Image (spheres, coloured by chain):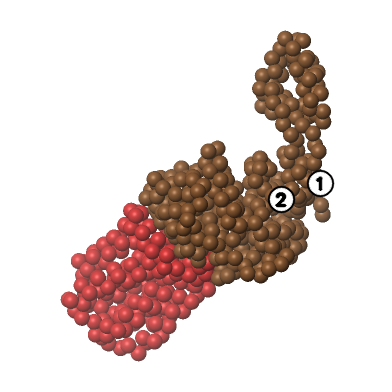
Amino acid sequence: MYAIAAAEIRMLFRNRTVALSALVVPVAFAAVFIVLDAYGSTGALASVVVVTIMAMGTYVTATTTLAARRQALWLKRLRGGTVTDAGVLAGLVGPVAAVTLLQLAVVLTVLAVRDAPAQAGLVVVALLATEAMFVGLALATSAVTSSGEHAQYTTLPLFFAALGASVWFQLTGVDEWIWVKRVLPGGSTAELVQGAWDGGDLSAAPALVGISLAWAVVGAVAGLRAFRWEPRH
Amino acid sequence: MTNSTPATAPTPGRATASGPAADVVVEARGLGVSYAGHEAVRGVDLTVRRGELFALLGTNGAGKTTTLEVLEGHRRPTRGTVRVLGGDPADRRTVRRRVGTMLQDSGLAPELTVRESVRLAGALSGRRDDADRLVGLVGLAARAGTRVAQLSGGERRRVDFAMAVWGTPELVFLDEPTTGLDPAARDDLWAAVATLREDGVTFVLTTHYLEEAERHADRIALMHDGTIRREGTVAELSGDRGSTLSFVPPVPLDELPLPVARTENDLVVVETTDLQGDLGTLTAWAASRGVPLDRLATGTRGLDEVFRELSQEAPRR
């Protein structure tokens, strides 16, 4: 698994298109949000940044990677050795998830210098639960994605849903349609990160973490059932 | 490629059991594979013994690639049993580490170099070896640091081969190994195979080049319409089918002294069971008419004839 991950990291940095979309674009988006500073509190800004970077850096990139590797018959080759299916998937997706967490560590540190989070531990929990959610959703989306190019389209619905849910929460808070916002991918993350950062009522925190983890499980189960290791002939 | 055996070449792991059972490396009984409403493989029985090179050939759509995928552990059979090295071919922990596979169409990562690709395959194989030794074995030492994206198709096949024989496995599946290779590279690959066979490696081969199977295989199985129709050594399969005379016809076909069986591009082919006699008749006729017999050649009616007969056989249901 580690050999696969090491190879993926090499390939990530050697492919300019992938490197741009996985490394530069998410952070650039986050930088725009920070510069515009349109969300009032640091917690609100952090929540939108987290969802944006993870949706782009983990969800879109992991979906694209899995679909492209399948199309190139690379998955078939990796599966022909002694590594389990879980190990192959972990080796492919692990570097993507790790890079995203690293990006978030840098960006959130910058925000923390401006205004430290009230409950940093809970912010970390939110990050990990959201990462698991987007990995599961990437697995599910990649099952219906035929190529890296096709991923540009298949990831749009969930990407915009996540981004939209986080922005919707920032604009309208907990007063309207709260459970709809929470259930949408990204909505629970937005509420949890902002609440953990700015301080406030965190009684819903277990449920919010649970929603992200539920999405992770739903995505993983659906993805593994439909996942193909070779292109459909 | 070079075919010298380095002193540091690792010794493959060997089964320690003795007796006839230990000689059987691959065994399939009643193998059947169906998908999408189509029965691609129907009741295949085959046995591959340790140390031999077994060729699985077949007409187009015969089911040989599907059969091979089951033996490699990439596909589950719908019915029947298959054992590879005494175990389930899909068992990655114990069986796969003793098996190397050169797939017909497996991909390579374009961003990785030759050396990195071979080393990665080694890490996945569970066996130990040296990437530079294998890169040299397949004649790519000067390209070890070149990215796969810059390799030709033939060079990529060589990388495939190096990845398959990493750590000198006990059993190697070669699925159309020489497709895309020039004649010199093909010779080098077969020389490398010969060296590995001296180490006791067993090979299962599929190829569309019949002459390769005729030259290198110990036993051959011919598939058609999902079943094995013929099996045996080259001599057993070819039997006494006579010979052929081929040449560029100097006159219209109906003026030739011998009946023409078929044409192949600009050559006519005469089938004969009396090669010496018919060759004498033909050359005497040409001399008397003062016409040339350009590209005159003789040949044996071998596997290609068996293939032609096979493709005419009716399906067995």
Image coords of residue A129 (percent x, y): 39, 78
Rendered position, B256 above or below B240:
above
The one of A12 and A129 positioned closer to us in this rendering: A12
Rendered position, A54 above or below B154:
below
**Crowd rating for badge 2 (residues with CA inside 10 Å; few <14, some 14–19, many 20+):** many
Q: Which residue is mark 2?
A: B219
Which residue appears at 46% of the width and 60% of the height? B129
Q: Is residue A157 left or right of residue B99?
A: left
The one of B157 and A38 positioned closer to us in this rendering: B157
The chain drawn in brown is: B
Q: Which residue is mark 1?
A: B314
Which residue appears at 75% of the width and 59% of the height? B45
Labels 2 and 1 positioned on one and the same chain: yes
Q: Earlier in the sequence, mark 2 or mark 1?
A: 2
The residues bearing labels 2 and 1 have C-alpha atoms spaced at a distance of 24 Å
Q: Is residue B304 left or right of residue B139?
A: right
> Furthest residue to the front?
B7
SS type, badge 1: loop
Host chain of mark 2: B
Which residue appears at 80% of the width and 19% of the height? B281
The one of B59 and A106 positioned closer to us in this rendering: B59
**Amino acid at dot 2:** Arg
Image coords of residue B122 (percent x, y): 47, 61
**Amino acid at dot 1:** Ala
The chain drawn in red is: A
SS type, badge 2: strand
Rendered position, A88 above or below B114:
below
- Residue A37 can be seen in this image: yes
